[in-house]
Image (cartoon, rainbow, N blue to C red):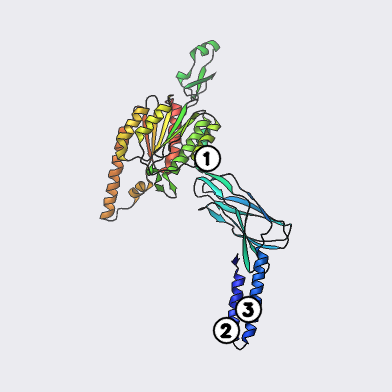
Amino acid sequence: MTPTRKLLWLFAALLAFALALPWLPLLAWWLVLAAVLLAVLADAVLGWRVPVLRAERSVAGVWPIGRWGDVALVVRHTGGRTLRLALFDHYPSGWGQEGLPHPSTLSAGQFVRFVYRVQPQARGDHRFGRLEARVASPLGLWWRRAWLGAETPVKVFPDFAPVLKRSLLAADRLVPQAGVIRRRRRGEGTDFHQLRDYREGDALRAIDWKATARLRKPISREYQEERDQQIIFLLDCGRRMQAQDGDTSHFDHALNAMLVLAWLAQKQGDAIGLYTFGGEERWLPPLKGRASFDRLLSSLYDLEASETHPDYLAAAEALAERAKKRALVVLLTNLRDEDSDSLADAMTLLVNPHRVLCASLRETVLDSELLRPVADFEAALTHCGTLEYLEARRKAFNALSGHGRELIDVTPQALPLALVNRYREMKEGGVL
């Protein structure tokens, strides 16, 4: 039981009257005080009885991080007297919320339904606690706290929908989309699809001369992109992936980009696999179909970057033991110059039988620094230092490229489209 403001104001009023009317007999004040205390105690006793309330919560089991969503609550009163309530829901710690507490007055047999909004701020497993109802005593001098309903577990997944929408346009070849490179020429690929009539623009090498002679009209071979290939993501969960770009970590940027490419790959008929290193190790063997994407999402939603330094060679050895069939291995990491030797050994180990694409996230602040005006000597030193660092980074990356190894060095925001573009080029060029 906790006192309400009404009780505090009551005692403040008594004190004010005592100071304003000192001429009243002392006995009269004692009688007034006794009557007030008796009323306060009686109200506390009556308000102590646990109200007969029932609560139900309706909430989605899966939430995308950062998006506002609704939580619906129903509270039923099956007891006697009319209740004045203040309702609080114990949503997961750290989430944003709008619409709480919710005041209500319920007579016997009535119920109230209300909706408030929450915004998840972190991926992983979370839990809504029990609903807290603060019930006013009959005279409104005390609050009695009651716990209603049950706890509700929820999962918060990465929200990759914005970049996925753009990438799906590229995957389905609907319309040209800014930033998405489309190089496919009609009928060209690596897997034979069908014979068809020659069309203007077909390459001469696409003409099937035997079919042309037999049918006495130009016939072209039509090819389609290879399917049933394997894409294995090698995800760095080390300490550098904790770096922030805006409100989002490099690790979350990498997750979103990986999920976009995974969605595209499964739509193209490729199998998706995963191996994480530099922290908690998780292995998902390559799997085809929509189930592969759902499995990937369910395996990653609660994964976070650790304080461990990544060991690229150990990760490559572990993956080589698990993945024997040729695959495109997509390494998502945040490289430094000092990683060159370790990464070179790792990529050399993987490049037979795999093809390796290393995507490194470059801090946006580096690009921003180059655009900043050089107004004084200190700014000039910073600008030159940034240029020197980026040049050393470029040379290190160039030394790692070639012989089945490729590197992409982009800002976190540009990573999804960079991966999509390179994947499409590889599929269309038949280099997987």
- Badge 2 is on which residue? 19
Residue 359, how many percent across, how many down? 39, 37
Q: Is residue 153 left or right of residue 248?
A: right
Name the disc covering residue 199, or none: none
The Cα atoms of the two marked residues, 1 and 3, are separated by 70 Å
- Asked if 129 appears above or below 358 in the picture, the reply is below
Q: Name the amino acid type tagged 1.
A: Lys
What separation in Å lies between label 2 and label 1 (alpha carbons)?
Answer: 72 Å
Question: Disc 3 marks which residue?
Answer: 33
Relative to 311, is 351 above or below?
above
What residue did someone put label 1 on?
Answer: 165
Looking at the rendered structure, the secondary structure element under dot 1 is helix
Residue at 37%, 25% (x, y): give it.
352
Q: CA distance from mark 3 to mark 2?
A: 14 Å
Q: Residue 4, how many percent across, how many down?
A: 60, 68
Determine which quarter of the picture holds residue 396: top left
Mark nearer the N terminus (2 vs 1): 2
Residue at coordinates 62% horizontally, 71% vertically from top-left?
Answer: 6
Q: Quadrant of residue 310?
A: top left
Circle 3 sits in a helix, a strand or a loop, which is it? helix
Left or right: residue 316 versus residue 198 is left
Q: Amino acid at mark 2?
A: Leu
**Tag 1–tag 3 contact (CB < 8 Å):** no
- In the image, which is nearer the foreground, mark 3 or mark 2? 3
Q: Among all residues in the image, which is located at the extreme bottom?
A: 23
Task: Using the rendered image of the protein, determine whether residue 398 is visible from the camera's viewpoint.
Answer: no
Precedes in sequence: disc 1 or disc 3? 3
Q: Nearer the viewer, mark 1 or mark 3?
A: 3
Q: Quadrant of the N terminus?
A: bottom right
